Amino acid sequence: MNIILKPQHLLSKKPNLTHFFSSKTPIPLPYGTETNDPSYKDIPKPVRDKSERKPYVTPMKMLIKRAKEEKEARKLQPCRMLENPPDNGLLVPQLVPVAYQVYEAREVLLSGISKLVKVIPVQKCRFCHELHIGHVGHEIRTCTGPGSGMRSSTHVWRKGRVHDVVFSPKSYHLYDRVGKPRVVHDESRRVPRIPAIVELCIQAGVDLEKHPTKRRTKPVYSIEGRIVDFEQAKENDENERNLHDENLDPLIGSDLGTKFDEARNLIVDKETDQLEESHEGVTDLREISIGTMESWFKMISGAKKIMEKYGVLTCGYCPEVQVGPKGHKVRMCKATKHQHRDGLHAWQEATIDDLVAPNYVWHVRDTNGLPLDNKLKRYYGKAPAVVELCVQAGAPVPGQYRSMMRLDVVPPDRDEVDLVA
């Protein structure tokens, strides 16, 4: 019996039908619904489970690789002078004007919101963090506070305040962000806590009398991973020789200090002139809302620039934020698995939303109409509380939030819900 062998390429193969019917096959989306569009923003996802950790900004593999590279660099050069600011204790000259702009924008923002709240009421739930902009609270059942099951997740509204619209967590103020970057548990009562956005501006170059901080003129050294400041020993010797000089400015006599002073004076004078002009000319509610929204975007964009150089950390399980190269060691975390950490926070890199919470609220198209219905919530859009407040006061809708607010969606009437697919 002769056996004929066929070539491999002539053998019959069964067609792979799973390729055609697989759910992984990409299906083209209709025009206008692509998620790759940078201008498209959908409403934010529901609040994550409290047991889940926040996603890492930098992938864990990248963090491990970076730590190994730093360890190898310390072995090759145990004693070295840090060259790049702000890790070496010096300020970044380009970010000093930005810090003053962010600080002044925050002051203008709070002033504008305090005026708008008197005209457009803000509703705050008594049992959860839900916020609503309008005269009447919405009827969407999303309450997760105590006793929400007894109320079918219905919110109980009360009058809100300015700080409910713009929530900024507090951070421990660091006098020396390089020499002593951490606050231990025993110092928690002595070290003041200020808004994190203000602490970021101070570390970036803003000088405030209430919250003094140390400014260096020479970089620090790293000896086997430990920061050593030789300038501190030199200052102590000079203080012993010159006892009559009690108040010494570390920036006097240096070109760097002169540049900082000139930039600070220019920014302060410019912002002061703008504030005077705004207080003199702004009499209309619409102009106030436009100026408030501009200050909001100015503060957010400036804070993002500063966070590229200055470190900001947040807990992976709770809203705690610490501005500085390292997180504090105060045992105050009460989130998931805090018993395994002895109350310490699980620090990781923070985002702009951790520093300044946007606090998304439901968008109301008709302020004089009926309250938002729970059955129609999939047709409603959202926006940050500041944006919604300014839009209701007469400011134009920002282009980057038009898709999130779903202005192109026409919600059906209440009696037409059953007729909509």
Image (cartoon, helix red, strand yellow):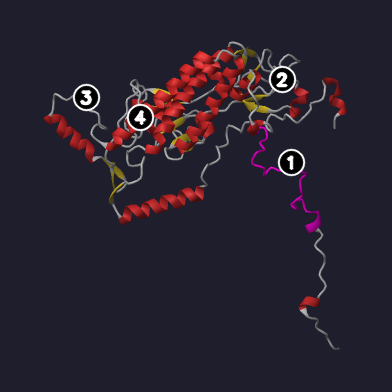
Q: Position of residue 150 (x, y in %)?
A: 69, 17
> What's the distance in space between the residues labelled 3 and 1, CA to CA?
63 Å
Q: Nearer the viewer, residue 9 or 31?
A: 31
Which of discs 2 and 4 lies nearer the camera? The answer is 4
> What's the distance in space between the residues labelled 3 and 4, CA to CA?
20 Å
Which of discs 1 and 4 lies nearer the camera? The answer is 1
Q: What residue is at 74 percent from the left and 41 percent from the top?
A: 33
Q: Position of residue 241 (x, y in %)?
A: 11, 30
Q: What residue is at 42 percent from the left and 31 percent from the top?
A: 99
Please identify the residue farthest to the bottom as the structure is shown.
Answer: 1
SS at circle 4: loop
Residue range highlighted in magenta = 19-46
Q: Which residue is mark 2?
A: 152
Q: Position of residue 258 (x, y in %)?
A: 29, 33
On the rendered structure, is 334 left or right of 188? right
Say if 317 sits above or below 123 in the image. Answer: below
Q: Amino acid at mark 3?
A: Asn
Q: Which residue is mark 3?
A: 247
Q: Which residue is mark 4?
A: 174
Q: Give the overall secondary structure of the magenta segment.
A: loop
Q: Amino acid at mark 2?
A: Ser
Tell me if mark 3 has few (under 14), some (14-19) or many (20+) residues whose alpha carbon lies within 10 angstroms of its own. Answer: few
Q: Amino acid at mark 1?
A: Thr
SS at circle 1: loop
Which of discs 3 and 4 lies nearer the camera? The answer is 3
* Mark 1 or mark 4, earlier in chain: 1
* Mark 3 or mark 1, earlier in chain: 1
Which of discs 2 and 1 lies nearer the camera? The answer is 1
* Mark 3 or mark 4, earlier in chain: 4
State the mark number for residue 33: 1
